[in-house]
Structures are given as structure tokens and as C-alpha cells.
Image (cartoon, rainbow, N blue to C red):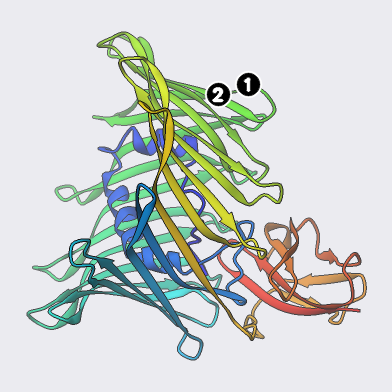
């Protein structure tokens, strides 16, 4: 399934953070789209579980999630989400409810039904709200794919209670290059007078030979000239795994630089960065700075960033966090800090601890907050994830790619993928009990399974846009 959700963290890559967060006014159209999309998909995202950041939908499914508030030594349930799955109709359902802390009564809040095609790509999501003891249609979005299973359009609808019909509201369209990377995004809204789609925002992207983003140009539609007008531009440069960015805005008839940031290496695992803004008098001034560490998968495990105040002529803390994993690379602890403006130092704010079961699923999270006066943590909120085991394994359709042979196998499984480069795939091998045995990137067209004991195994192969599932027998 697409749009993977990791329950450990939602961490934005530092360069994207600098570009998007500090220029909200200039990319508001795309931000609004992303926000709308995420709000619609929140329940669908929660259906997805993970093992070492690799989904195992065919063995374990989320049954329910219960959230608790903590007061002293007591805790009480305040929210829950229940899930159901229909293999015949390819539908997943999530129903959320909240608890009235005064009456202790539960009340339905929302209901999401997601429908998938035979390739496990989501094609429809409908959201309902609970009103007058009934589920009322609220919104839906429809997703279309090309022959490469790439998302080419997403259309958002809202339910009109007067006409009792779905009304088209918003649409985003995607184009891709030969490597399967997004090369263009166009946002449109419906003109309710003409009943036609009107495009208002476009983004074009270019990549280098290593498939790294080197240029991103944003356009706005001009209704007077009926042309796309330059808005902002990002140029990116790479050197020894480090990235530098130059930011431009379109002024009358030329691009003018207004910001830049540069990365530098502090040590093998830590990268620092400095960002500067450009003033009218041709002087670069401090904007922000920081450093972050990455794990072997390129995910930030810590970040500490600062912004510069010209009112006080000093740096102040912006973001700081640390995340830790267990010996088997499962999430264990995430600590968030806040900045004390009077003391000019960081202080503990929030800590989340994760408990994983024998199948590497996170079944319990406990969030605590720090009492600076007492110098100790107190429990704030917790969450229990309940899982159901599926007795049968739904393999990918027979006509899906890639294909694996021989099966049964003695030493090496060969991967056959028509028209696709297998080196762009990742694979994971699991036991029937859901234990992760091996996880790696494809470097050639075969997988060495000689180290496995004889028996039946599950293979997950992840491409850019989908996950393939297959069973194989090791002799």
C-alpha cells in the first residue's frame, strides 16, 4: 500500500524543513494540499503497521488503538479507533470514538472506508462524521494510477447535503520522469460557475544522474495573461553527500536570490548547516543554524536547530529532539526539548517510550512530560495497539511484477521484473510468525537464501510505489 505511516516519528528531512517551513507564505498552495491530503488519509495511515520500517500487512493487522490520559497513578481511556478488513471487497474501515470525561460515555467521531485495487493501491477513501445518531457523508478522494502504478491524479470531493451528491472540489495531478521521480505537480480547484477545473499552482522538478533533486520551480497561474508566472525557485548542489540550497523569488523579469543554506560534516554521523538571508544592501545575514544525525537508513535520530533574532542580536533554540533504538533497531525512546528564553538553554519537554512485542510490533507507547520544578517526569498519555493475526497470506496477484524463481529454492532466488530495474527495490524475508530474518536493498537480480533453514518463508519486495508479497519454500 502507498503512503506509509511509521508510528515511531514523523520527522521532516532537514532540507525540506528549511525550504517549506520558513517560506510558508510562498508555498501555501502546496502546503494546503498536503494538509488536506493528510487529514483525509489519517485513518488509512493508521491501518498500516511496521516491522523495522517494513510493512507486514498480510500477517498482522491493527485491530484497535486505545489512547489513555494519565492523572497521577490513575489512567482512563479517552479515545479509541477500531479497524475492520474485507478481503473480498478490498475495503478497510476505521471508526474513531471519543470519551466524555464527565459522563464517561463514548461518542462516535468519524468513520473512514478505504478501497484498494488488486495491486493494493488505494483508489477511494470516503470519510463520514457522526451526526444525529447517524453516519453522514463528509468527504472523499479518488486516486488514479498509470501503468507503472504511479499516482497520477487525486481528486477531492465534498458531500453536498442539499443536492445529496458529491461535489468536485480540488485536484492534484502528477507527472514522472523515466526514473519514476515526480517531475511536475499541478493543483486545480473547481470553478462552480463554469463547472470547469482551474489550475492555480504548478511545480516542476529536475534531477541529476544520481536522481537527486537539483532544481524546483514554482509557478502561479495569471488569469489576466492566461500564462504560468514564475514564483519561486530552488537550486540544490551536492558534494560528498552534503547538500546546499539557493532560494530565489521572481521579481518583475528576473530571479533574485533571497536565501541560502549550506551543509557541512561534523563527524561521520553528524551534519551541520548554516542558513543566511539576503538583505537589500547586498549583505548576507544570519538566519538559522543547526546540526542533525542520521542512522544507516538516512532517518534523523537527533536534531538541534537555532534561529537568529535581530531584536536581541542572539541565537534562540528552535527544535531539538533525540531518538533511540533498541539493539534490534526497534524504536525505544524519543525525547523532545523546548527552549527557555530567559535562561537561554534547552529543557526537557516530552518523552515517548515504545514497547515492542516478540514480532517487533510496537504495542504500547507511553508519553511523559517533564516537571522542571520537581526535576522529574510524570505520565501524560499512553496508547495501546491491539493486533489480530491473519491465518492466510494474501499474495500479490499472479500477473504482478516482479516474479521469483525457482520456487522451491536451494541457494538463490532470481528476480524478474519486466521493464524495471531491480536495483531500485528493497526486500525483506520473514518467518511465518512474522519475525524479520533479513532486510536489504537489491544490488543484483537474485537473493541469496542459502543461510535459511529448510521451510516456508514470506518475501516482501518494495518498489517505489508498491509492496509485492510472495511465499517461497527453502529446500
> Horizontal and vertical percent for residue 470?
71, 78
Label ID, residue 272: 2
For residue 281, which quarter of the picture? top left
> Horizontal and vertical percent for residue 265?
63, 23
Q: How busy is the neighbourhood of tag 1: few (under 14 within 10 Å), some, or many (20 plus)?
A: few
For residue 141, which quarter of the picture? bottom left
**Residue 426 falls left or right of residue 345:** right
Q: Nearer the viewer, residue 134 or 371?
A: 371
Residue shown at the point (20%, 51%) measured from the top left? 226
Q: Are marks 2 and 1 in contact (CB under 8 Å)?
A: yes
Calculate the distance from the C-alpha at mark 2 to the C-alpha at mark 1: 6 Å
Question: Helix, strand or loop at disc 1?
Answer: loop
Residue shown at the point (36%, 29%) measured from the top left? 248
Residue shown at the point (92%, 75%) measured from the top left? 410
> Horizontal and vertical percent for residue 34?
34, 54
Question: Helix, strand or loop at disc 2?
Answer: strand
Q: Which residue is label 1 attached to?
A: 266
**Residue 10 falls left or right of residue 36:** right
Instruction: Relative to 22, say whether 142 is above or below.
Output: below
Looking at the figure, which quarter contains the C terminus? bottom right
In this rendering, the count of numbered labels is 2
Q: Residue pushed farthest bottom?
A: 88
Instruction: Relative to 371, say whether 2 is above or below.
Output: below
Amino acid at each position: 500500500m502507498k503512503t506509509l505511516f511509521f508510528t515511531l516519528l514523523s520527522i521532516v528531512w532537514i532540507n525540506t524543513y528549511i525550504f517549506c517551513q520558513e517560506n510558508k507564505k510562498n508555498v501555501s498552495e502546496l502546503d494546503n494540499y498536503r494538509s488536506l491530503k493528510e487529514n483525509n488519509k489519517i485513518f488509512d495511515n493508521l491501518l498500516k503497521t511496521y516491522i523495522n520500517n517494513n510493512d507486514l500487512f498480510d500477517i498482522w493487522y491493527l485491530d484497535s488503538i486505545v489512547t489513555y490520559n494519565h492523572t497521577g497513578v490513575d489512567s482512563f481511556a479517552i479515545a479509541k479507533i477500531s479497524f475492520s478488513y474485507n478481503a473480498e471487497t478490498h475495503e478497510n474501515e476505521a471508526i474513531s470514538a471519543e470519551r466524555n470525561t464527565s459522563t464517561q460515555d463514548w461518542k462516535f467521531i468519524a468513520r473512514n472506508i478505504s478501497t484498494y485495487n488488486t495491486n493494493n493501491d488505494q483508489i477511494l477513501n470516503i470519510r463520514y462524521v457522526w451526526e444525529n445518531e447517524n453516519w453522514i457523508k463528509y468527504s472523499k478522494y479518488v486516486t488514479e494510477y498509470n501503468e507503472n502504478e504511479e499516482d497520477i491524479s487525486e481528486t477531492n470531493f465534498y458531500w453536498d447535503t442539499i443536492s445529496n451528491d458529491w461535489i468536485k472540489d480540488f485536484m492534484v495531478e502528477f507527472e514522472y520522469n523515466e526514473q519514476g521521480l515526480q517531475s511536475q505537480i499541478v493543483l486545480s480547484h473547481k470553478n462552480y460557475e463554469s463547472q470547469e477545473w482551474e489550475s492555480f499552482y504548478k511545480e516542476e522538478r529536475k534531477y541529476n544522474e544520481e536522481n537527486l533533486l537539483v532544481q524546483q520551480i514554482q509557478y502561479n497561474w495569471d488569469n489576466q495573461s492566461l500564462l504560468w508566472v514564475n514564483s519561486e525557485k530552488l537550486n540544490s548542489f551536492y558534494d560528498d553527500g552534503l547538500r546546499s540550497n539557493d532560494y530565489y523569488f521572481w521579481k518583475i523579469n528576473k530571479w533574485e536570490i533571497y536565501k541560502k543554506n549550506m551543509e557541512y560534516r561534523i563527524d561521520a554521523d553528524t551534519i551541520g548547516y548554516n542558513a543566511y538571508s539576503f538583505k537589500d544592501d547586498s549583505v548576507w545575514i544570519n538566519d538559522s543554524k543547526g546540526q542533525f544525525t542520521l542512522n544507516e537508513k538516512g532517518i534523523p535520530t537527533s536534531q538541534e536547530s537555532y534561529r537568529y533574532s535581530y531584536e536581541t542580536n542572539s541565537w534562540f533554540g528552535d527544535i531539538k529532539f533525540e531518538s533511540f533504538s533498541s539493539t534490534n533497531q526497534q524504536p525505544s525512546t524519543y525525547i523532545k526539548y523546548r527552549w527557555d528564553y530567559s535562561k537561554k538553554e534547552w529543557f526537557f519537554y516530552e518523552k515517548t517510550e515504545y514497547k515492542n512485542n516478540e514480532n517487533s510490533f510496537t504495542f504500547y507507547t507511553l508519553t511523559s512530560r517533564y516537571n522542571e520544578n520537581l526535576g522529574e517526569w510524570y505520565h501524560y498519555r499512553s496508547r495501546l495497539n491491539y493486533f489480530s493475526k491473519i491465518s492466510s497470506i494474501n499474495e500479490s496477484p499472479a500477473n504482478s511484477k516482479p516474479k521469483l524463481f525457482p520456487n522451491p529454492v536451494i541457494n538463490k532466488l532470481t528476480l524478474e521484473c519486466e521493464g524495471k530495474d531491480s536495483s531500485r527495490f528493497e526486500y525483506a524475508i520473514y518467518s511465518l510468525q512474522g519475525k524479520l530474518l533479513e532486510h536489504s536493498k537489491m544490488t543484483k537480480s537474485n537473493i541469496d537464501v542459502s543461510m535459511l533453514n529448510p521451510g516456508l518463508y514470506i518475501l516482501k519486495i518494495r518498489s517505489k510505489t508498491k509492496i509485492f508479497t510472495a511465499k517461497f519454500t527453502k529446500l
